[in-house]
Image (spheres, rainbow, N blue to C red):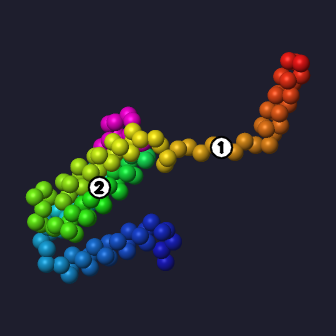
């Protein structure tokens, strides 16, 4: 029995990939090309900008992934191969715009939350504040 969810996920995705490969008429080149469309539209920009742009943020990366994949899938569904520009390049361009806009706009996602203050620390702050007040008056 498989105890690890990661191992189970790897086995299930491998089985899905094998079933797809056995039941498709695409060549291996077409299957690899299709796999890299997803990577280009959704993953490359956050990876590249995260490594080389100091102002990249979590919000920018999530916006880039969403914009890139959504625009690629929309153009692919509506126009398909009739598009003047390949749909994955439109997704790539939208991903870049999403990364820049999401990183430069006010941050709503990925902000560190305030750590809870222990009761002892609050009590110490209260004592410190009361002693300051007494010395002022």
Residue 25, compared with residue 104, is above or below; it is below
Along the polypeptide, which appears first: circle 2 or circle 1?
2
Which residue range is magenta in the image? 47-57
| Residue 55 belongs to the span the image colors magenta | yes
Instruction: Tell me how far mark 2 sits from mark 1, CA to CA.
Output: 34 Å
Residue in the image at 12% along x and 66% along y: 81
Judging depth in this view, the residue of 16 and 64 nearest the camera is: 64
Quarter occupied by residue 50: top left
Q: Which mark is residue 115?
A: 1
- Determine which residue is flagged by label 2: 68
Residue 2 seen anywhere in this rendered image of the structure: yes
Q: Residues within 10 Å of mark 2 (few under 14, many from 20)?
A: many
**Element class at badge 1:** loop
Residue 46 seen anywhere in this rendered image of the structure: no
Task: Please state the horizontal and vertical placement of residue 49, each as a whole percent of the image.
Answer: 32, 41
Residue in the image at 20% along x and 80% along y: 22
């Amino acid at each position: 029995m498989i105890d690890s969810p990661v191992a189970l996920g790897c086995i299930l995705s491998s089985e899905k990939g094998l079933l797809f490969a056995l039941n498709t008429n695409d060549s291996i080149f077409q299957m690899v090309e299709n796999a890299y469309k997803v990577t280009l539209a959704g993953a490359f920009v956050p990876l590249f900008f995260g490594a080389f742009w100091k102002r990249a943020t979590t919000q920018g990366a999530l916006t880039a992934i969403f914009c890139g994949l959504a625009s690629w899938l929309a153009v692919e569904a509506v126009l398909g191969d009739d598009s003047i520009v390949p749909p994955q390049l439109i997704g790539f361009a939208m991903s870049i715009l999403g990364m820049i806009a999401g990183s430069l706009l006010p941050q709503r996602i990925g902000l560190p939350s305030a750590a809870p203050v222990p009761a002892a620390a609050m009590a110490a702050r209260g004592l410190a504040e009361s002693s300051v007040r007494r010395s002022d008056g």
